[in-house]
Amino acid sequence: MANTTSAKRAVRQIARRTVVNTARRSRVRTCLRTVEEAIVAGDATAAKAALKVAEPELMRAVGKGVFHKNTAARKMSRLSRSVKALK
């Protein structure tokens, strides 16, 4: 357990940040899942629309430090390639 005042404060900050980051990660995963479901269903227009929503959400998570930029780039590249292949 934290002993100093600053350590106790750090624990509180980490707890708050964890909640926010978990929500952010969940939101990104949901967006990515909707794209993947549209791809599996073979619906090119829905997949394209979902990808347009997922990209800024993923990049926002990168900016906040939730995902590494290379991870996001890899995910976007793979999804874009899959959506392109539907046409």
Image (tube, rainbow, N blue to C red):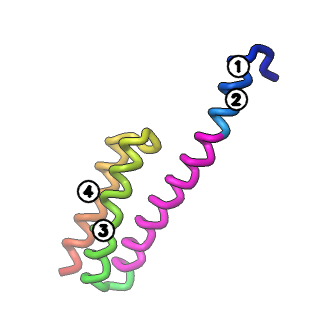
Q: Earlier in the sequence, mark 3 or mark 4?
A: 3
What label sits on residue 77 in the rendered view? 4
Q: Residues within 10 Å of mark 1 (few under 14, many from 20)?
A: few
Q: Secondary structure at mark 4?
A: helix
The stretch drawn in magenta includes residue 28: yes
Asked if disc 1 and disc 2 are in contact, CB closer than 8 Å, the reply is yes
Give how far apart the Cα atoms at labels 4 and 2 are. 37 Å
Where residue 33 appears, x then y in whole percent?
A: 45, 69
Q: Earlier in the sequence, mark 3 or mark 2?
A: 2
Circle nearer the viewer, 4 or 2: 2
State which region is magenta: 16-39
Q: Secondary structure at mark 2?
A: helix
Give left or right: position of 85 versus 66: left
Give how far apart the Cα atoms at labels 3 and 4 are. 11 Å
Vertical comparison of 53 with 63: above or below:
below
Circle nearer the viewer, 3 or 1: 1
Asked if disc 3 and disc 4 are in contact, CB closer than 8 Å, the reply is no
Give left or right: position of 48 versus 35: left
- Which amino acid does the dot numbered 3 rest on? Leu
Q: Residues within 10 Å of mark 2 (few under 14, many from 20)?
A: some
What label sits on residue 7 in the rendered view? 1
The stretch drawn in magenta includes residue 46: no
Query: Residue at point 45% right, 59% down?
Result: 28
Q: Residues within 10 Å of mark 3 (few under 14, many from 20)?
A: many
